[in-house]
Image: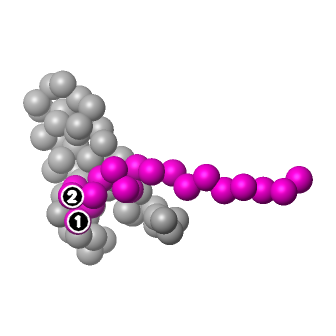
Amino acid sequence: MKKLDQNTRRVVNCLNASRRTLDPSFRAYWKDTAKKLATKNSIDLKEITKNLELYNAEVETSSIH
């Protein structure tokens, strides 16, 4: 998976926060924030929401020391 740019990472973090919270008002806040960021930066929110697990996966890199 390619490295995500900062704006995509922000949208993913907002969607993750909306999934974690129990308070409906906070959930609405995070979803609204994700929608605003996606619209402002021309990011497909539906695509991210559909494949959120892929965006949360971290790529492990190996390094030779």
Q: Which residue is mark 1?
A: 47
Q: Which is more toward the observer, 22 or 32?
A: 22
Residue sitting at x 16%, y 50%:
32
Secondary structure of the residue carrying tag 2 is helix
| Horizontal and vertical percent position of residue 13 | 36, 47
Secondary structure of the residue carrying tag 1 is helix
Query: CA separation, marks 1 and 2?
Result: 5 Å
Q: Is residue 37 magenta?
A: no
Q: Which residues lie in the magenta part?
A: 47-65
Q: Which is more toward the observer, 41 or 22?
A: 22
Residue sitting at x 37%, y 56%:
54
| Horizontal and vertical percent position of residue 43 | 27, 70
Q: Amino acid at mark 1?
A: Glu
Q: Which residue is mark 2?
A: 50
Tell whether 11 sits left or right of 35: right
Q: Amino acid at mark 2?
A: Lys
Q: Are marks 1 and 2 in contact (CB under 8 Å)?
A: yes
| Horizontal and vertical percent position of residue 10 | 37, 54
Tell me if I can see residue 3 in this picture: yes
Query: Relative to residue 16, is residue 58 depicted above or below?
Result: below
Q: Which is more toward the observer, 38 or 3?
A: 3
Residue sitting at x 23%, y 39%:
18
Q: Which mark is residue 60?
A: none
Tell me if I can see residue 36 in this picture: no
